[in-house]
Image (cartoon, grey):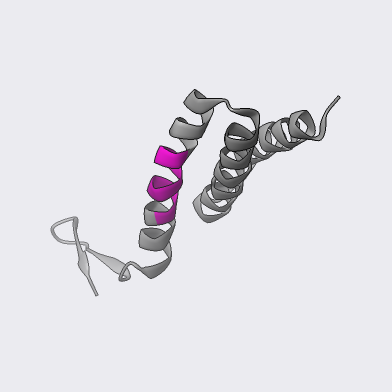
Amino acid sequence: MSWINLLGFAAAVTVLASFCMSTIVSLRSMARASNLLFILYGMLGGIYPVLLLHLTLLPINLIKLYRIRYRPPQTIDPTKGVRFPA
């Protein structure tokens, strides 16, 4: 088994681990690691569909992780049930 295959297995394990996460921040962080490993695997193995998919998913995961970490706190107006920034 080549080291490129081991890289692919490591990437697959990170996908599996992301499904075991209990919070959205940890899930997105693990997905980001998975994307990076699959990008390396796709480049080094010449597997262009995998490379293209994870080059597309990486910025999505980064943006969503950024929005989760830096969004303003939300409060709920109990009379209207409407969310608005605090």
Q: Nearer the viewer, residue 82 or 1?
A: 1
Q: In the image, 81: left or right of 63?
A: left
Q: Quadrant of residue 45?
A: top right
Span colored in magenta: 55-62
Say which quarter of the image contains residue 10.
top right
Q: Quadrant of the C terminus?
A: bottom left
Q: Residue at x 21, y 62 (%)?
A: 78
Q: Position of residue 55 (x, y in %)?
A: 45, 41
Horizontal arrangement in the rendering, residue 56 relative to residue 26 (left or right): left
Q: Main secondary structure of the magenta part?
A: helix
Q: Residue at x 22, y 70 (%)?
A: 85
Q: Relative to 61, does residue 7 appear above or below in the rendering?
A: above
Residue 8: x and y, percent? 70, 31
- Using the image as rendered, state which of residue 51 and residue 86 is in the foreground: 51
Q: Quadrant of the N terminus?
A: top right
Q: Foreground residue, 18 or 76?
A: 18
Q: Is residue 34 above or below residue 9?
A: below
Left or right of 8: which side holds 34? left
Q: Residue furthest left?
A: 80
Is residue 14 placed above or below 12 in the rendered structure?
Answer: below
**Taking 41 as reference, is 75 above or below it?**
below
